[in-house]
Image (cartoon, helix red, strand yellow):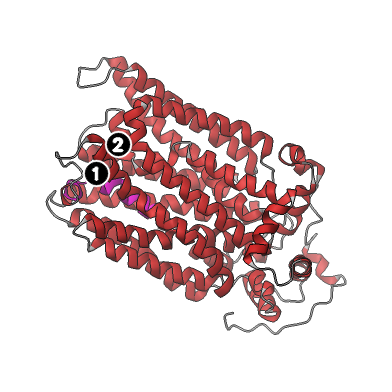
């Protein structure tokens, strides 16, 4: 049996089992949909065959027109993702988390097929837009499901499987582009088609995996299928319905859902939206989600991911193969950092301290690159030894900024968003915030070519460093620590005055008693829950 003893505090050991890890693997892999696209388009727009096919360096176009064409191609997925996030708000509550996963994979694959058959920029736009509709759903469906099925003390690890797999996708795409740069002719369409096709392979793996996972017990309970919810929970936990741990978790889920349904029976989406903004606690939650997206997106990390070869060229990495290889190594660094954060930091150090560490590392790295670009003369010239050493340090700083992003904003942006809302509001709230996420990402990828022309490269990096510093101050004051808390207990923190939630919420509102004190409590009296025979048939 798979188990990580360092993650267990008050849960029985059997809750960490193969069924849980399979569910985390399948839904966690959804993050690769974003990473594969971002990493792929980063290298693709630098491939000579792609540049020639879609006239990215057409001499008849002005520099601003070429920048506009490039930004349109890279950002079209973000436009589609805005629509996808809105679709996911409705779909995953109507057909469930598992079927929503399957639906988004099909849409994503259709978009990829349209892209790889493109011979003109119009069809390419269409394919990237359709793929974006699928990818946009992943950031709502994945974190929502993972948050709902994971035990409290590994919820951070489970949700970080999603954010970490973003960089698995980035790394795979970077190396795929590097491979075709080395081995495929600059005149062959296969130079960019082969890396793009990798997305279909990953979608197929997840589609097959979805056959073997169970639906979210919280969603089943929410729609009134209580017996199926109990059966699903028992299978995911690998425990009998008579176990104290399962009984306690069912009671917590039922009480929260019943309380919400009594208060807002028959509410429409408009009424739910009104609820989302009508109470101070929900407004604070919405404020947290939006600001995390705003500050994280404009910290520069996604810009570096999407335009990585250009950033390495800024620090004087020359040659197509050298730029693509440096970009591929960036993918390895980000993936390794995200794994380390998920396994060793996010549930042990807590959300806040992990974020502080990542932001600090990202700030000093980006600041160094900005200073380097401002201090070292531009253009072709013989560099002094000091300039060469400073250039190597600038390359290392770009890698360290990726580590900081993976440890900081990237881990928190999905995890906190999925943790702080109740079951009733989670899909709607996550959908709204992910719409904001993709609007920001669209604006960022769209604006970067123009920013580099207007602000210069060093000015753009100084801008990112300033945003990162603001983000550190904001996180210290506003972001609450929710590590290790049950989803049902997090609500109490938001009843505090707004100026105390972030700084002192975890101190003033202690966690409710653990669901289980020890495995020996199985012999004590148990709450009465109707027994449901659990079979091997999947829910």
Image disc number at residue 427: none
Helix, strand or loop at label 2? It is helix
Choose between 539 and 69: the one closer to the eye: 69
Helix, strand or loop at label 1? It is loop
User: Looking at the image, is 430 positioned above or below residue 330?
Assistant: below
Q: Residue 382 at what x, y percent from top left?
A: 20, 17
- Please give the range of residues in magenta: 35-51
Other-residue count near label 1 (Cα within 10 Å), few / some / many at <14 / 14–19 / ≥20: many
Q: Residue 124 at what x, y percent from top left?
A: 27, 57
Other-residue count near label 2 (Cα within 10 Å), few / some / many at <14 / 14–19 / ≥20: some
**Is residue 254 on the magenta stretch?**
no
Give the residue drawn at x 69%, y 73%: 221
In the visual, does 123 lie left or right of 294?
A: left
User: Looking at the image, is 179 positioned above or below residue 326?
Assistant: below
- Mark toward the start of the polypeptide (1 vs 2): 1
Residue bearing the label numbered 1: 46
Residue bearing the label numbered 2: 310
């Amino acid at each position: 049996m798979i188990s990580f003893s360092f993650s267990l505090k008050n849960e029985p050991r059997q809750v960490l089992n193969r069924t849980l890890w399979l569910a985390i693997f399948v839904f966690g892999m959804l993050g690769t949909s974003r990473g594969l696209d971002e990493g792929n388009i980063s290298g693709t727009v630098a491939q000579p065959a792609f540049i020639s096919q879609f006239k990215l360096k057409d001499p008849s176009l002005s520099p601003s027109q070429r920048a506009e064409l490039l930004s349109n191609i890279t950002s079209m997925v973000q436009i589609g993702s805005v629509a996808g996030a809105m679709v996911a708000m409705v779909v995953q509550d109507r057909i469930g988390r598992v079927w929503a996963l399957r639906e988004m994979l099909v849409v994503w694959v259709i978009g990829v097929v349209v892209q790889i058959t493109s011979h003109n920029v119009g069809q390419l736009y269409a394919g990237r837009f359709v793929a974006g509709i699928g990818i946009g759903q992943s950031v709502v469906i994945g974190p929502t499901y993972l948050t709902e099925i994971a035990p409290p003390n590994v919820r951070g690890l489970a949700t970080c499987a999603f954010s970490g797999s973003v960089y698995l996708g980035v790394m795979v795409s970077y190396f795929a582009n590097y491979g075709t740069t080395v081995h495929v002719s600059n005149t062959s369409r296969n130079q960019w088609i082969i890396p793009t096709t990798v997305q279909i392979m990953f979608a197929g793996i997840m589609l097959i995996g979805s056959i073997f996972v169970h639906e979210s017990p919280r969603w089943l309970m929410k729609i009134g299928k209580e017996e199926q919810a109990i059966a699903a929970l028992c299978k995911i936990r690998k425990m009998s319905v008579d176990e104290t741990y399962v009984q306690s978790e069912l009671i917590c889920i039922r009480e929260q859902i019943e309380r919400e349904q009594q208060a807002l029976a028959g509410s429409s989406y408009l009424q739910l939206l009104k609820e989302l903004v009508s109470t101070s606690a929900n407004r604070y939650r919405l404020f947290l989600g939006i600001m995390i997206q705003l500050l994280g997106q404009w910290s520069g990390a996604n810009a570096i991911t999407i335009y990585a070869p250009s950033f390495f060229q800024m620090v004087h990495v020359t040659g197509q193969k050298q730029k693509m290889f440096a970009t591929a190594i960036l993918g390895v660094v980000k993936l390794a950092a995200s794994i380390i954060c998920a396994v060793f930091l996010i549930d042990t150090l807590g959300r806040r301290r992990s974020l502080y560490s990542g932001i600090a590392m990202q700030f000093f790295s980006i600041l160094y690159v900005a200073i380097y670009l401002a201090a070292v003369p531009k253009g072709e010239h013989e560099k002094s030894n000091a300039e060469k050493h400073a250039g190597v340090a600038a390359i290392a700083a770009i890698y360290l900024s990726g580590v900081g992003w993976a440890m900081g904003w990237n881990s928190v942006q999905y995890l906190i968003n999925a943790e702080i809302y109740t079951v009733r509001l989670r899909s709607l709230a996550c959908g709204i915030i992910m719409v904001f996420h993709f609007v920001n990402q669209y604006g960022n990828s769209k604006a970067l070519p123009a920013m580099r022309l207007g602000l210069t490269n060093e000015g753009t990096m100084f801008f990112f460093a300033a945003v990162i510093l603001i983000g550190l101050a904001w996180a210290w004051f506003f972001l609450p620590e929710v590590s290790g808390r049950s989803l049902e207990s997090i609500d109490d923190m938001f009843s505090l005055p707004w100026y105390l939630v972030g700084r002192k919420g975890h101190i003033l509102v202690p966690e409710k008693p653990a669901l289980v004190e020890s495995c020996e409590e199985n012999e004590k009296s148990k709450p009465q829950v109707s027994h449901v025979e659990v079979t091997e048939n999947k829910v």
